[in-house]
Image (spheres, grey):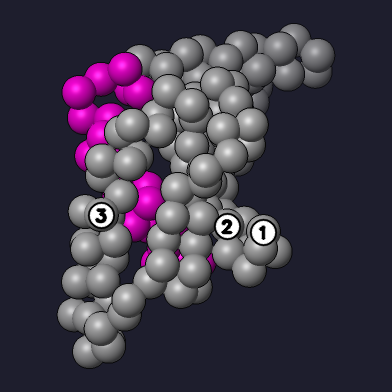
Amino acid sequence: MQLRDELLNSLMKEAGSKCKMVVSGQNYPALLQKLIVQGLIKIEEMEVVVYCRGEDVATVTKILPKAIEEYVAIIEKESGVKLEPKVTLNGDRAKDLPDSSNGGVHLTALNGKIVLDNTMTSRLELVYLELMPSIRAILFPEAE
């Protein structure tokens, strides 16, 4: 049982290192934009603060207006309502996401009462939990 857990943990660490390759790729700004848009759709609030890693601040600053524009267009298309959300980037660099988040964003609303974690690490954990039964079946087939 312990060996099984160690193998699954090493698989998770390897997947985390692959995430680090994604954030250094040229498509990372587009991914960040999609993560922000998805977060805005899920959080459903008009005033949102976006948090990112310190090294992503310039990229997020650049793509944030496009992400807001895309979000507004999606909501208008789906509901006919044109929103004017106030989405800002966290100004306190001490509250930047840690490097261990492997990139991505946190979105908060209502003074931090609503938090949406859309980091690469949180997404990896979600996929891992959803696929856990399949991963176990592949790695540890039951003896017949």
Return the residue found at the far front.
Answer: 91
Q: Is residue 123 visible?
A: no
Displayed quadrant of residue 20: top left
The residue identified by callout 2 is 108
How many C-alpha atoms fall within 10 Å of the one at disc 1: few (<14), some, or many (≥20)?
A: few
The residue identified by callout 3 is 65
Nearest the eye: 134 or 10: 10
Mark 1: amino acid: Gly
Displayed quadrant of residue 67: bottom left
Q: Nearer the viewer, mark 2 or mark 3?
A: 3
Mark 3: amino acid: Pro
**From mark 2 to mark 3, how far is it between C-alphas?**
17 Å
The residue identified by callout 1 is 112
Q: Position of residue 138 (x, y in %)?
A: 51, 24
Q: Quadrant of the N terminus?
A: top right
Q: Position of residue 40 (x, y in %)?
A: 41, 63
